[in-house]
Image (cartoon, rainbow, N blue to C red):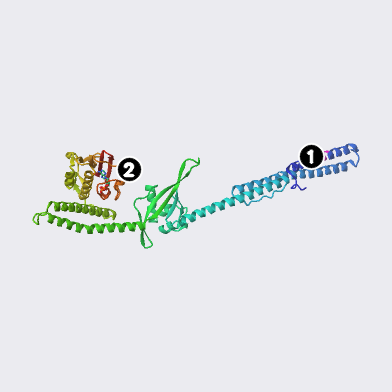
Amino acid sequence: MKMNGMNIKAKIALTIGVLVSMIVLLVALSVANLQILTATEPDSPAAGPGLNRALIWITVIGGICILIGIGMLIKLPASINSPIKQLADGILEIANHNYDVTLNLKGGEELVEVSKNFNRMARRLNEYHNSTLSDLMASKRYMETIINSINEPIIGLDNEMNILFINHEALNVLNLKRENVIRKSAQEIAMSNDLLRRLVRGLIEEGGKVKKEPLKIYADNKESYFQVKYMDITMPGKDGVTMEKRGNVVLLKNITEFQELDTAKTTFISTISHELKTPISAIMMSLQLLEDKRVGHLNPEQEELSNSIRENSERLLSITGELLNMTQVESGKLQLKPKITKPIELIEYAIKANRVQAEKFGIQIEVEYPEDKIGKLFVDSEKIAWVLTNLLSNAIRYSSENSRVIIGARQVNGNKEIEMYVRDFGKGIDPRYHNSIFEHYFRVPGTKVQGSGLGLSISRDFVEAHGGTLTVESEIGKGSCFTLRLKA
Ligand code: ADP
């Protein structure tokens, strides 16, 4: 009997039908035999063999019925289970993203229908998967092309510091091969790569910031300078609102060209200022001779002219001095010669250097110095004295005539540090400019007093070179206070 072409309901009905008809047949045969036996003469000679024949027939037919029944019972569950198993296997394949699977279920129209629908679904999924996959691959390639076409080194890292992407330029600068780094731990690679080690250390120490100091790299037989920028990669989290950090991007900007220009500028300024110092000193010496009464008397007009020459020569000398100081800091040639110094000595030096100017503007200089409470400093006294002189000169220049200026020192932070300050009651500085005034050449807009805009930037460099700080507190119309803090 061919069961494969039937549907499940028909199979069950047929099986039950066959079994019932066999039982009915068996009962009918038994009844017929019993009737034959009761109808014939039990004592007749034909009764014995007749009974035996009847028993043999009943046994044979009964046996066949039982075998057919067992066969059908075995075959029925198998013929139902087999397509279900095939279907389950197919679903499993789909779940494992194998969309090439096809089903060819046999055993009735419903199963053929199920196969057709299943195969159609698999085909659709395959098409969808191929299209999204190729879309994704295309956008990935597109992104990679963009990143590779940027000629500044870029490295992308996940939160575990595995390298997600890296462009050609970064591979070139780091002297690495793409296949050895993608999806590998940057920290592990850094163990055998000095430059990557510096970048990773920078990321751990100052993640999310621009590194102030440029990174010097020796590659292709020349020195290159890079500015390193660390950026966080943030994306919306599962809730679609909160931003989550997914990693970092390390950007290296090649600033070699600017660095070379800057060095050239520093060398130029340094040479010029140095060369100017000699003629200016010669002018001042000649002026001194001119003013000497032994050489001859100057009439009042000539005296006025010689005063003007002296003032301007002094100014020129101070500017060249400032420029030289700046170039020293910029070229990293600043050398400190520290020695034990009493703060009052530095204060007295600054007052002496500014006395003439203070008298000229009628400014009174007051000293706040609790002698017994102030410890000693271990500093390059020339440099710190220069800073105090410059701060005091500013305080005098930016104050109105006949006002007062305070210079002092105090012990702070549990006597571990010493602060020296210069306070004036002059025009004050707008809070907008409190940071900019420490930049090279910056002058508050509208400043009429002559100046170079270099004094405060050099002062801060000098103080920072000692590990100290130089800060300002100032309010427009009330005055300013510049404070330098150094280790006692
Ligand atoms: P310079 O005084 O030669 O211009 P500085 O670097 O010493 O250069 O000062 C930068 C600017 O900060 C000045 O041009 C001035 O505008 C402002 N400034 C500095 N000190 C004071 C002060 N005590 N009071 C008001 N403004 C000041």
Disc 2 residue lies near ligand 1 with CB under 8 A: no
Q: Measured from the top left, where is residue 145 in percent x and y?
A: 49, 56
The stretch in magenta equals 17-27
Q: Measured from the top left, where is residue 299 in percent x and y?
A: 12, 53
Q: Confirm whether residue 116 shows in the render.
A: yes
Residue 431 counted in the magenta span: no
Q: How many angstroms separate mark 2 from mark 1 (CA)?
A: 104 Å
Looking at the rendered structure, the number of numbered marks drawn on it comes to: 2
| Amino acid carrying mark 2 in the image | Arg
Drawn side of residue 249 relative to residue 26, left or right: left
Residue 19 counted in the magenta span: yes
> Main SS type for the magenta part?
helix
Report the front residue among 30 and 315: 315
Determine crowd level at label 1: few under 14, some 14-19, many 20+ residues with C-alpha closer than 10 A.
Answer: few
The image shows residue 210, relative to residue 39, as above or below, that is below
Drawn side of residue 28 relative to residue 485, left or right: right
Q: Which mark is residue 126?
A: none
Q: Residue furthest left?
A: 294
Drawn side of residue 228 relative to residue 386, left or right: right
Determine crowd level at label 2: few under 14, some 14-19, many 20+ residues with C-alpha closer than 10 A.
Answer: few
Quadrant of residue 169 in the image?
bottom left
Report the front residue among 238 and 443: 443
Report the front residue among 64 and 474: 474
**Tag 1 residue:** 20
Report the front residue among 211 and 6: 211
Viewer-nearest of discs 2 and 1: 2
**Tag 2 residue:** 432
Q: Secondary structure at mark 2?
A: helix
Q: Measured from the top left, where is residue 367 in percent x and y?
A: 18, 40
The image shows residue 225, relative to residue 33, as above or below, that is below
